[in-house]
Amino acid sequence: MTDQLTTLLRHARSDRRTTAVGRAVALATAGLVIGNGVRLRRRAAALPALPYPTLDASHPPAMPPNATDAPQDSVDEYVFFVAEGVTLDDATRQAAIAHLETTATDVVDLIPADLPSLRALDLLRMVDPRSFGGSPMAQGRGAFQVVCARAEVADRARLTPGCGISLQRMVHATLELKRHAPRGTHHLVASHLSA
């Protein structure tokens, strides 16, 4: 009888330890998931928006010099890399050029506001917008939808701009542009751009 009682007590202690370990693992996992969610939310909140010029109805938008009707074309010293299936509207093109002209930025990765959630999560996992531009060692990562760059940076990287670029070439272009403009590459959310 005492042997049976001793065996029962051992099993009870073992079950309690197993239950305690299981609870600890569950709590640690929940903590990691919540912490990761907070980290991604902070990164999303840190993504700046592309400033679009406010248009007055009495004044049509001014076209940059040498601009053509095709919004994918490069304008003067700025070039665009546009992924397959993405249409770059004129307002976004002009806003991106204006941003490059008024800042010390050399390359801007435009993130569509309607980027699918899985791709947005991938972007936020890879890019911390608070430190990306100032980190020369950060790898070039982005939404791989539209990238606007100064022509001199694209020339140094030996890249050919254009529209209808495959995902593989967009990834390569983003990596090379960051490598050739290590402190001048940033990300902006473009509300008029559609993925």
Image (cartoon, rainbow, N blue to C red):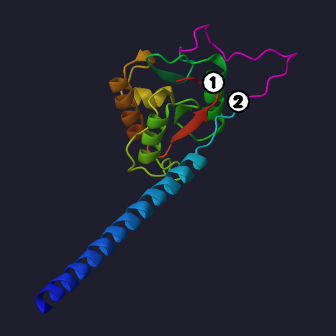
Image: magenta residue range: 52-72
For residue 173, side relative to residue 99 (left or right): left
Instruction: Determine the residue located farthest toward the front in the rendered image.
Output: 1
Q: Is mark 1 on a helix, strand or loop?
A: helix
- Amino acid under label 1? Thr
Report crowding for label 2: few under 14, some 14 to 19, many 20 or more residues within 10 A (C-alpha). some
Task: Identify the residue at horizontal 51%, vertical 42% (top origin).
Answer: 184
Question: Which residue is located at x 42 percent, y 34 percent?
Answer: 177
Secondary structure state at the residue bearing disc 2 = loop
Would you name the residue on which mark 1 appears?
92
Q: Give the vertical position of 94 relative to 35 (above or below).
A: above
Side of 98 relative to 115 (left or right): right
Toward the viewer: 166 or 149? 166
Locate residue 191, reporting x and y percent.
Answer: 64, 30
Quarter of the figure with residue 141: top left
| Residue 57 against residue 9 in the figure, above or below | above
The mark found on residue 194 in the picture is none
